Amino acid sequence: MKLSSLILATLSVAALQAAATDITSPSGQLKLTVDVNAEGTPFYSLDYKGKTLIEPSLLGIVADETKFTDGFEIVEVDTVEVDRSWEPVWGEYSEVRDHFNELAVKLHADNPNRDMTLRFRLFDDGLGFRYELPVQDGPNYLTVKDELTQFNYTGDHTLYCIPGDYDTDEYLWSETPFSGLADALNSYGRHSEAQRTGGSTIQTPMLLKTADGVYVNQHEAALDGYPAMLLDIDTDNYDMKAHLVPDRLGVSAYLLLPFHTPWRTLIVSDDARDILASQLVLNLNEPCAIDDTSWIKPMKFVGVWWEMFTGYQKTWAYSDDRLAKPGVTDYTKLTPNGRHPANTANVMRYIDFAAENGIDGVLVEGWNEGWEDWAGYRKNRQFLFDKPYPDFDVDSLRNYAQSKGVKLIMHHETAANAADYELQLDRAFKFMKDNNYDAVKTGYVGAIIPRSEHHTSQWMVDHARHVIERAAEYQIMVDSHEAPRPTGLCRTYPNWLAQESARGGEFESMGGNPPSHTCILPFTRLKGGPMDYTPGLFQTDLSYYGEGKDTKAGTTIARQLALYLTMPSPLQMACDLPDNYRRFSDAFQFIKDVPVDWADSRYLEAEPNRYITVARRDKHSDDWYVGAITDDTARTAEIDLSFLPKGFEYEATIYEDAPDADYRTNAQAYRIRTVKVKPGQKLKQNLAPGGGAAIRITAKSK
Ligand code: NOJ
Ligand code: CA
C-alpha cells in the first residue's frame, strides 16, 4: 500500500485568552466553530454552505472518578491541513483521497486538574471529531458512565433510522420526522427479547435529511476499546445526544489513560450521491496494520445455507434426538435425522457447482457438533469448532475442494458464547488452516456470554477486535454476523471482508424485506463497511418450497443482480440453490461475471429509501458494470454513460425487468438484451416496481 502525504500548513496558536476557534473545510463549504461556554463546557457548531446545520452542541465525558464536562479553558489550538491518498486492499475505489483541515483544541481545568484534547477533522464531505484523554494529574483509570456529545439540529428534519437496541440491528428502517419518531419506533414488534433502550433512542449509522435537502449520515469511525454509540433523540427540540451502550452494571467503558474515543462522524452533502460516495469513515481509520496482504482475496461464494431457510425439513443439526438423550457425547450414537445438508455428498455437489461456474468458495453451515441443543446443553460450551459431524468428512472434502480449485468457507456459530469462542479460537483457527479453510463466517445469535454483556458493549467490541487480529495472524478472512456494527476498521484489518450487522437477505424467508430496504442500507449501514447481504435470490416466491412458507420476497430477479453493484462488498454470496440457478442460467451469467473489487465507482442517481443507480469499473479489467434499483414504484433510471472513456465502441448486456414484471405478481420476469452504447449517451432504463437492472459494459474496438 502506498501512502502519500502532504502536510500543507501547520499553525500553532498558544491561545492564552480563550477565543472561539473557527475552521473551514478545504473548499470552505463546511465551517466549524469550537469554544467553551460560561461553565467551561466545550461545545461546537457546524455550518454548511453558509447555513447553520448544527447549533451549539455540548461535548464531554462523565466517569465515576471525574468529569470531563466543565471548568475548562482552551490552552492551545493547533490547525493543520492534510492532503494525502491511500490505496485500499479492496473496495469501491483503487485510491482514496484523504483531505481535511484538522483542529486540535487542548483544554485544561483546575480543581480538580483535568486535561482533554478535542480533535476535529473537517473534510469537504463532513466532520469527524474525537476526545483524547492524556495521562492526568489525577485518576487514570476511568469508569465511564456517559458521553455528553450533542448534535443539535435546527428543525423537524426527516430521520431514517432503526430503534436503539443494545443487541440487534436486524430491523426494517423508519422514515420519520423527529416529531413522529416515538410512534415510528413503537411500531416495531420484533425482537422483544432484545434489550431495548426505550424512549426515542436510535442506532447509528443513521441518515437525516433537512427541509432544505441537506443529507447527513451520522455514525462513528474506528470503534475500538469503547462501546458503540446510540443516539437519544429529543423530538421537541430536534436534538441528539450520545448514548453509550452499557454493560449490565451500567458502566459503558473501563478505560486506562491515555485513551482516545472513536471519531464521531457526520457525512454532509446536499447531493445524496455524495453520501454514498463518501470515504470519510474509512479515512478516519488507521492505515492497514497487516504487512503482507497478498492472502486477502475478495470472492464470491455459494453455500449450504439457503436450504435451511427455505422449508422446515432441513436443519443445521445432524440429529433430532439430542435433547431426548442428555448425557450422550458420542455423536455416532445419535440417530441421524437425514435432513442435514452439510453432509459430505451434498457439499461435494456444491463444490461441483462452484467449480463449474467459476465461483470461488462454498460455505458450510451445520458441519460441527453442537446444533442439537441451541439452549446450551453443554452449559458453558455448546459448539466445538474442531469436531465435525459423523456425516461431514473433512479429509475427503478438503481433497475434493482442492482438486476442483474451490475454497471451503468455515462457519463458527458461537451461540453468542463469545467467552468460550476466545478459549477455542486458536484450536479452531488451526483446524481451519490444517484443512485448507482461509475464511470463516462467525455468528453470535442469542444473549452474549458473559451474560452481563451486550452485542455492542465495550467487551464485545474488544472481542471482535481480538478475533480479527488473531485471524490475521492465521491469515484468515472473516465475515462476522451479529457483531458490533462496522466503523471502517476493515481499512486497518482488510481481512475483515464483510459483516452482517443489519437485516439481511435471509429475512426474505422470514417476513420479507420491502424493496425500499436495500435503497436505504447503502446510505446507512454500509457507510461503516461492506455487508454480507447475501443477494442472488432467484426463487423469489417462497411458497415454491411448500411447508408453510408463504413469503414473497421484496424483489424481482433483475433487482437481485443489481444488488451486486448497489451493495458493494468484497465478499458476495450467490445465496440461492444451485437448482434455481440452473433454471435461470442466463441470468446467473451476470453473477458469474460481476466482480467484487473495484477500481472506480460513480454514483449516478440516488435518493434514500427510493432509488440508487451506480456504475463501477472492474479492478482487473476495463469493464464497467451498472446497477440500478428502485423502491416499490416503477421508475425510469437515467444512466449517463459519460464515465466511459472516449475512443471505443462499447457493448452493453442489459439484465432488466420484463415490461410486465412486478415484485408482487411477476418477479421472475426478466429480459436480457445486448446493445451498442457510446460514451456520453444517456440510457433510459425501465425498472419495475421492486425491480432493478444490471448491466455489463465491455469495450469492443476502437
Ligand atoms: C444467523 C446468521 O445471520 C445466519 O446467516 C446463519 O445461518 C444463522 N445465524 C445460523 O448460524
Ligand atoms: Ca443474523
Image (cartoon, rainbow, N blue to C red):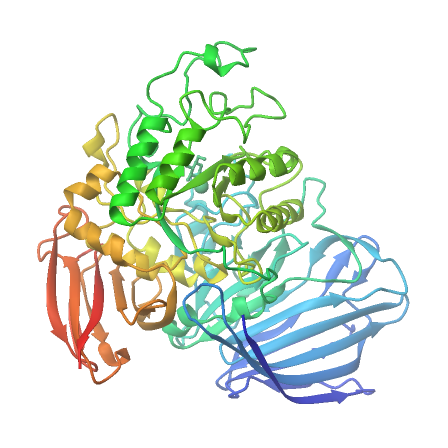
Which residue is at the front of the view, 322 or 198?
A: 322
**Relative horizontal placement of residue 537, taking residue 527 as reference (left or right):** left
Task: Determine the residue positioned at 32% across, 38% down.
Answer: 351
Looking at the image, in which quadrant does ligand 1 appear? top left
Which residue is at the front of the view, 668 or 176?
A: 668
Locate residue 105, reporting x and y percent: 73, 78
Q: Give the quarter of the image for residue 231.
A: bottom right
Query: Looking at the picture, does residue 306 appear above or below residue 617?
Result: above
Locate residue 294, reporting x and y percent: 50, 59
The outermost residue toward the left is 660
Task: Determine the residue positioned at 21% across, 50% down.
Answer: 588
Q: Give the quarter of the image for residue 530.
A: bottom left
Q: Quadrant of the C terminus?
A: bottom left
Locate residue 92, reporting x and y percent: 41, 67
Q: Can the viewer see residue 323 in this picture?
A: yes
Q: Give the quarter of the image for residue 345.
A: top left
Q: Quadrant of the N terminus?
A: bottom right
Locate residue 323, reporting x and y percent: 49, 14
**Relative horizontal placement of residue 75, taking residue 432 as reference (left or right):** right
